[in-house]
Image (tube, rainbow, N blue to C red):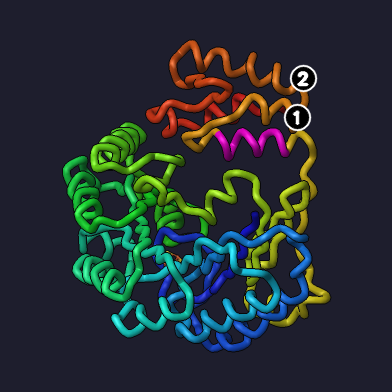
């Protein structure tokens, strides 16, 4: 099964923490939408005969597109692929774009899941991150989405803010739980170079939250959402039973995907990864035929390391049978030898043929997983 990703690279303004590619002028929106169709058409065969299981509109801010524009992209995809097995059509949205009429029209176009960028239920946090909405709007958006018939909602939250306390984080989580959404993604704030926060940090004007505070907030996140009935199925992702993200799970379990739009990545499910330039002007100037993709052919070692990087961030973990089948007995032995010390220290557990990180170890997963890499 495969996924289809659309990158909509427009935002009304830039949030201070964000390093996704987007621009703040919508002047080229019509040209972009036309080019997305052309790129889909030309690269329809990238996924071979793999049936599509999910469509995902990410950005940027896809909710800056009119519902009919999104519907037109879905219809065009339907002319190229059989969409009868598509389970999930997700659109990332900002609360301030979503009115009742907009949501009803979007649902009618075939979008069946919304990913709402709420980030925080504290207005002072939202202002500090330069978000455009306030907490009351975020809550109202969820109500309107339900009214419009959306029965699959996910929201994003950010923790690890420098001034965040366990009390304010607990309150944020409780407000998210009270909204009764199906899925929550929670990310630790990172001060990326090239963002406003990254530049402030480089000038010494912003100090990141200390690791201990981040770790305690992560533990609270796991405990509070777990107690509320959410399954912690991936490092940053929590779902009500049966509501795991279909599209993003495809990324974590090595399924192929085609990405269209500036900065969008594609993977053939075997060895080839390629991505578009993160530059709208250039994306529009190149025709789909002469597009200059960046490409990477994954070696056996890359594939092995990526398998561990993605699987060990999931609750399912790394499967010894898959490791042996895909990478051979030598790498399987290597993995088991390297992983033994993490079993001894209790950071990993083995259940049947699967090795997985303990929930508390997710927070330090980068260090553990890189130690298991094949150099
Ligand atoms: S977080 Fe979303 S709305 Fe904010 S700049 Fe990034 S893509 Fe745009």
Please identify the residue farthest to the right as the structure is shown.
290
In the picture, which quadrant includes the C terminus? top right
Q: Secondary structure at mark 1?
A: helix
Report if the CB atoms under discs 2 and 1 are less than 8 Å apart: yes
Relative image position of residue 335 (x, y in whole percent): 65, 21
Magenta region, main secondary structure? helix
Q: Secondary structure at mark 2?
A: helix
* Label 1 environment density (alpha carbons within 10 Å; few <14, some 14–19, many ≥20): some
Who is closer to the viewer here, 353 or 221?
353
Relative image position of residue 59 (x, y in whole percent): 51, 68
Residue where numbered disc 1 is placed: 327
**Residue 330: which disc?**
2
Question: In this orientation, does residue 6 appear?
Answer: yes
Who is closer to the viewer here, 102 or 308?
102
Relative image position of residue 324 (x, y in whole percent): 72, 25
Query: Image check: 44 left or right of 307?
Result: right
Quadrant position of ligand 1: bottom left
Q: Residue at x 58, y 69 (%)?
A: 6
Query: Image check: 101 left or right of 92?
Result: left
Q: Residue at x 62, y 17 (%)?
A: 338
Please identify the residue farthest to the front as the structure is shown.
84
Question: In this orientation, does residue 278 appear?
Answer: no
Up-down: is 289 above or below 120? Answer: below
In the picture, which quadrant includes the N terminus? bottom right
Residue 122 lies in quadrant: bottom left
**Residue 87 belongs to the span the image colors magenta:** no
In the image, the segment drawn in magenta is: 303-311
Report how far apart the C-alphas of labels 2 and 1 lie in the structure. 8 Å
Please identify the residue farthest to the top as the structure is shown.
344
């Amino acid at each position: 099964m495969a996924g289809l990703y659309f990158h909509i690279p427009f935002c009304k303004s830039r949030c201070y923490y964000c390093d996704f590619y987007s621009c703040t002028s919508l002047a080229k929106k019509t040209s972009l939408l036309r080019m997305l169709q052309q790129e889909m058409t030309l690269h329809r065969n990238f996924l071979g005969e793999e049936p599509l299981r999910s469509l995902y509109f990410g950005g940027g801010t896809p909710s800056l597109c009119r519902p009919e524009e999104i519907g037109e992209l879905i219809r065009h995809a339907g002319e190229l692929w059989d969409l009868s097995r598509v389970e999930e059509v997700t659109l990332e949205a900002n609360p301030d774009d979503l009115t009742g009429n907009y949501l009803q029209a979007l649902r009618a176009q075939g979008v069946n899941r919304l990913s709402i960028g709420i980030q925080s239920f504290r207005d002072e946090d939202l202002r500090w991150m330069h978000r455009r909405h306030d907490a009351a709007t975020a809550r109202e958006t969820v109500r309107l989405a339900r009214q419009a018939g959306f029965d699959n909602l996910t929201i994003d939250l950010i923790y690890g803010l420098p001034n965040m306390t366990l009390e304010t984080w607990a309150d944020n989580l409780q407000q998210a739980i009270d909204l009764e959404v199906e899925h929550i993604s929670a990310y630790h704030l990172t001060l990326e170079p090239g963002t406003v926060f990254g530049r402030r940090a480089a000038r010494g004007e912003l100090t990141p939250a200390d690791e201990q505070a981040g770790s305690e907030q992560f533990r609270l996140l796991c405990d509070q959402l777990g107690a509320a009935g959410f399954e912690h199925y991936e490092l940053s992702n929590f779902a009500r039973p049966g509501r795991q993200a279909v599209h993003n799970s495809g990324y974590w379990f090595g399924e192929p995907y085609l990405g269209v739009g500036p900065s969008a990545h594609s993977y053939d499910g075997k060895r080839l990864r390629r991505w578009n330039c993160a530059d709208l002007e250039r994306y529009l100037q190149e025709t789909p035929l002469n597009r200059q993709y960046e490409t990477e052919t994954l070696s056996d070692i890359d594939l092995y390391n990526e398998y561990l990087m993605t699987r060990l961030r999931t609750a399912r973990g790394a499967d010894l049978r898959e490791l042996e089948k895909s990478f051979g007995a030598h790498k399987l032995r290597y993995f088991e030898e390297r992983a033994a010390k993490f079993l001894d220290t209790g950071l990993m557990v083995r259940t049947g043929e699967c090795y997985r990180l303990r929930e508390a170890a997710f927070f330090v997963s980068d260090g553990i997983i890189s130690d298991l890499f094949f150099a």
